[in-house]
Amino acid sequence: MLKFTEEHEWLEVEGEIATVGITDYAQNALGDVVFVELPEVGATYEKGDEVSVVESVKAASEVYAPLAGEIVEVNEALEGEPGLVNSAAMDAGWFFKIKIADAGELDDMMDETAYAEFIEGLD
Amino acid sequence: MSMNNQGRPTSAGAAAENTDFESFSGHKGLRLAEPLIFELGSTETTGVDVPEVGKFEMAIGGLERTSEIGCPGLPEPDAVRHYTRLSRRNYGIDMGVFPLGSCTMKHNPRLNEKMARLPGFGDIHPLQPKSTVRGAMQLMDELSHWLCTLTGMPAVALSPKAGAHGELCGVMAIRSALEARGDAREVILCPESAHGTNPATAAFCGYKVKAIPAKDNGRVDLEALKGALDDTVAAVMLTNPNTCGLFENEIRDIADAIHAAGAFFYCDGANFNAIMGKARPGDLGVDAMHFNLHKTFSTPHGGGGPGSGPVVFSDALKAHVPVPFVVKTDEGFDLVEDADDKSMGRLVAYHGQMGMYVRALSYMLSHGSDGIRQAAEDAVLNANYVLASLGDVMTASFDGPCMHEALFDDRFLKDTGVTTLDFAKAMIDEGYHPMTMYFPLVVHGAMLIEPTESESKFNMDQFIASMRGLALEAKAGNVDRFNGAPYHAPWKRLDETQAARNPVLRYSPEE
Amino acid sequence: MRYLPLTATDRQAMLDKIGVRHIDELFKDIPSDVLNPEIDLPRFKSEMEVERYLSRMAAKNTAAGSVPFFVGAGAYKHHVPATVDHMIQRGEFLTAYTPYQPEIAQGTLQYIFEFQTQVAQLTGMDVANASMYDGSTGCSEAVMMARRVTRKKKAILAGSLHAHYASVVATTTQFTDDVIERLAPNPADPEAELQAAIDAIDADTSCVVFQNPGVFGSVLDLKPLAEKAHENKALLIVVVTEVMSLGLIESPGEMGADIVVGEGQSIGNGLNFGGPYLGLFATNQKFVRQMPGRLCGETVDADGKRGFVLTLSTREQHIRREKATSNICTNSGLCALAFTIHMTLLGEKGLRGVSLANHKAAVDLRDALKTVDGVEVLNSTFFNELSVKLSKDAATVVDALADKGILAGVPASRLYPGEGLDDVLILAATETVTADDISALVAGLKEVL
């Protein structure tokens, strides 16, 4: 199940684990990604906490926890190849996997169609 | 005739066709290539006379450095060539118009350099006995007097080493004052258009930063500000004229509202060039303001410093100034170096940027009160001339008049395929350093142009004609001129992505 | 006026184009009752008048080069080759801006890259930044960096650290929850000073800051200090106020430093009554993203030609704003240029030679001072600076010698008032000190003590 937040994060949910990344729209606005600061495995966050920072040459953006949970895995490939966020934002450029604490927090999120409408409204 | 064989061709000859070859040396005429010193010199070469010392018993506790340091040396002729060649790749104020908004790239008078190098100023140690540096203390006192008089403020701290350091000094004074009256507060308000140093400084001093919105006319929304001012606000940091190049006309109401809430008014003085001699921040309710001597008072930018950021204070804050500072005594002057319990303490070793004080005072003495006022007027005149001359082909972000800088945005480039960045790089091909781009953040694709008072009308007209030409080219759809620019500079566009993804921050022999 | 090119005719034409009659119409946003105030300052002066005025002021000061000179304590008089000052005054260097448009700033960027490399080599560390304002503010930035890296709050400032540097750290952290533990200076027993620093480290320690050579001149092996710090997951910050010492003494990097902060004034830059100076800042590769200040990195341009750019800017204020590693905007560019030019003229060979000459001058000074009654040399180790205990108040002695035209050093009481060090004098002897200077000093001391 693919969900989106208004902060331009996507979640691919499988059981209790959500894989989180930033959307194609977001990576395009950011420019060439040069560095991603990833959270520690085992750390827990509330919804809206700052979990990660994604840096381009001219900007740094916070990535927030889309829902509460514990980090179970991070994408180590981003260390050597931060450009994956640009070239494959929606799959190989994922940031972290989080064990969902409260599945109810998914209810308010957008699906793909709703997100597409959302970003159209932004431009 | 007596035969003479010295004839040689002296006319220009036919137009040359073949310019596309690589030279054997790697140079291109006067454009000389130059590798790194590590690729030229060696650790065995030196360009100085090494003193002959002879054998003696050392006293360094056996801690002699036996490993190689690696720094190469060059003989003096090669060293001079190396740096001469490097210099020729740089643009500077000495080359041409440098319209960098918010930076005040005015002419750097050479008299200032001569004065700073007088042995009595350049060759004195900060910790010499005070009886041997009376002239230095006098100079600091006189500079203090000029800064206080120009601003109408009673006290000044000279020691901060740069503008951001001055901001730190100002915010620390504010926090000291609040703590002294038992009223610790948590928040500082800054406009969204503020320079990054403002929120960075506030955070550094432990404050949370909240944004103040602006009105459509580019100025602070007074009603919104009043709404945000409560007893958690320690200070409001404003730049005036602001980073959009506009004077905050409601400044006195703003100051009153700030003070009524028990907070302090910090003014970022980066744009003082627009109002020096025309208005005094002390008359406008400012509690603390830093100067950038390297902007307003002509001390050189030097490729990135050194700067100098003295701060003036109101009566409410003057007890908290840092040490050291100069005071007048019966014998002349003294330097107070030990902080009392009200002072915020010491912000830097020794006494501050004396080399910059000499230069700034030399500038001030040269202009005088009348020249300083004229300089501000000319700076504002030049900027408005640019605004009036380009407003029809470029999009000014706000209605005029502006102060010493004119703000445009990228609306005039809409649908041309040319961005602010491309436009700026094309200016390089025209022989100009680009204007400040993408700052302030409050307009899209900002272009902030500050000519300063140092430009003649001829220079202004030439600059305006170039900008006009570029704007029209962009609108005519000639994207090639822009997308790959600059074409005429010594280097083409550089790959900043690679530099950030794989940082190589030094030369390593393995390379 | 010689710096203002606009003529009355120009101004009129420009006002016409803008569509206003009088310049003050452009200042209409300034409340009219505060516009054009009466400014009680002198009016314009010609270049000749300014020169005369400032020259008279300068003549009231005693230049270091004109007398026997032994003043140090963190700023040193060295011989700077004439080439340096000429090159830095080239307009392309002097009047350039920060290299944000790299295509027209490769001169600045290449020298910064060379400077960063030289600083890393001298300090024995992996990387260095493009410079800080000076050593003292660099020291305070290093303490804050250690906090970011270790996430601990307690910083230990050893007794060997220059009093001004310690004050700057204390002032800059006064509003945070950093705990700054300042250890007492001990000029008579530098080994005890080192041991006190070692003993003070515990599991809560974020960093220990140790100056070597210390403010009183002693040179020590810091490896035991580094070991204790690392055992406790703390960083060792070594401060070097006399960068010339790095040409003779084992580097801080080799001794185990995690961050090295230096004052670069000795190389390329004159005394200038305290500024502008040059902060050196170096660290190891793993801490690069936590470093404050500007960084220059290598890259290529669109034609594949090697070039340089400012990089890792996302640490800085103009991007990160309130989350920046520091609020710093500028570095000390032209002073860094002077340093790198001087260092290129020296090269390793020249630096080693001049450093050795510094130490020899100090050894000669020590030997001469030993012959003076009322002077007790405190140091057993030193580079180019040592401390003595006098039989009289040191400040009084220094003032008396100044009246005789000798600048004999820094009384410890100037840096440490009220700490029982009133009889201690700190003297520096660089390669500029001659045998005659030392004789004059000795003769003067014998008269005054």
Image (cartoon, rainbow, N blue to C red):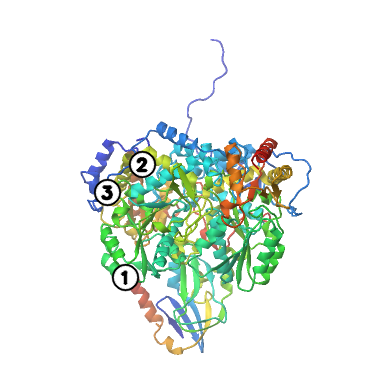
Residue A99, image x and y in percent? Answer: 52, 86
Q: How many marks?
A: 3
**What element does badge 3 sit on?**
helix
Q: Nearer the viewer, mark 3 or mark 2?
A: 2
Residue shown at the point (25%, 44%) measured from the top left: C23
Task: Classify B366 as above or below B417.
Answer: above
What residue is shown with label 3?
A: B388
Q: Nearer the viewer, mark 3 or mark 1?
A: 1
Q: Are marks 1 and 2 on the same chain?
A: yes
- Disc number placed over residue B455 in the picture, else none: 2
Cα separation, mark 1 vs mark 2, equals 42 Å
Disc 2 residue crowd, few under 14, some 14–19, many 20+, Cα 10 Å: many
Cα separation, mark 3 vs mark 2, equals 16 Å
On what subunit does the disc labeled 2 rest? B
Residue shown at the point (69%, 64%) measured from the top left: C195
N-terminal label among 3 and 2:
3
On what subunit does the disc labeled 1 rest? B
What residue is shown with label 1?
A: B228
Residue C293, image x and y in percent? Answer: 53, 58
N-terminal label among 1 and 2:
1
- The answer to which quarter of the image holds residue B329 is top left
Camera-side residue of B460 and B218: B218
On what subunit does the disc labeled 3 rest? B
Q: Are marks 1 and 2 in contact (CB under 8 Å)?
A: no
